[in-house]
Amino acid sequence: MPRATAGTRVRGRRGASRPGRAAASPGPSDPAGLAGLTHLDRRGKARMVDVSAKPDTVREARARITLRLRPATLRAIRRGEIAKGDVLGVARLAGIMAAKRTAELIPLCHPLRLTGIDVRFVLDGPRSAVRVETAVRTVDKTGVEMEALTAAAGAGLAIYDMVKAIDRGMRLTDLCLVEKSGGRSGRWVRR
């Protein structure tokens, strides 16, 4: 029996779910091939999902990431004392650009017509952190979760690049989807 790609779970002997084994044939409860993973075909191979028959709908996703840094670094960002310039302005543009380039970075993402991208920052003195919050909108056939996550990561990495000369120990943490709306699955909110 051929092996499936890493991380997939498929049917083995006697119907038991086991990692690393390809499915003999998907059943009626598994129309996508492997436990509903739409980016895998019936043989467990990666594929780009065909969304041509889906209607265009309004979709939005929000994501966030947190940068943990030294208090002195946060003060320097707040006061505009970073030698490279406007840290948050550059990071905002990096986040916007990252969202627009998601399909070039994530192999199975569809290029989407983005209608809005917001990137904002919360400077948290007591926790010595910068929280990056993104919101991405579209009217299209598939969601913008990956674009919101990519925007947050891109903005966070730009902040790191702008201030690494004074604080190489920064940590990017807690990248996550916060909320999504639109499409067949409707609204989802992180608890």
Image (cartoon, grey):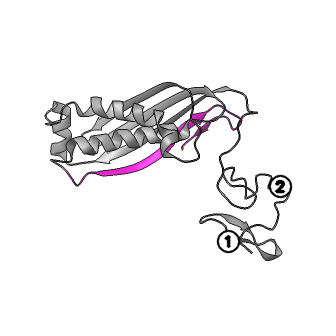
Mark 2 lies on a secondary structure that is loop
CA gap, disc 2 to disc 1?
Answer: 22 Å
In the image, 81 versus 46, the foreground residue is 46
Foreground: disc 2 or disc 1: 1
Image location (x, y in percent) of residue 144: 56, 35
Looking at the image, tell me whether mark 2 or mark 1 is earlier in sequence order: 1
Q: In percent of the image, x 15 and y 37: which residue is there?
A: 76
Highlighted magenta segment, given as a residue range: 168-190
86 over 124 or under it: above or below = above
> Can residue 176 be found in the magenta stretch?
yes
The image quadrant where one finds the C terminus is top right
Q: In percent of the image, x 63 and y 28: which residue is there?
A: 140
Which mark is drawn over residue 29? Answer: 2
Image quadrant of residue 81? top left
| Label 2 crowd bin: few (<14), some (14–19), many (20+), radius 10 Å | few
Q: In percent of the image, x 21 and y 40: which residue is there?
A: 74
Label 1 is placed on what type of residue? Arg
Image location (x, y in percent) of residue 138: 57, 27
Quickly name the residue at label 1: 3
Q: Residue furthest right?
A: 28
Image location (x, y in percent) of residue 7: 60, 64
The answer to whether 83 appears left or right of 64 in the picture is left
Image quadrant of residue 35? bottom right
Image quadrant of residue 182? top right
Mark 1 lies on a secondary structure that is loop
In the image, 17 versus 75, the foreground residue is 17
Judge whether residue 144 can be spotted in this image: yes
Image location (x, y in percent) of residue 26: 81, 60
Label 2 is placed on what type of residue? Ser
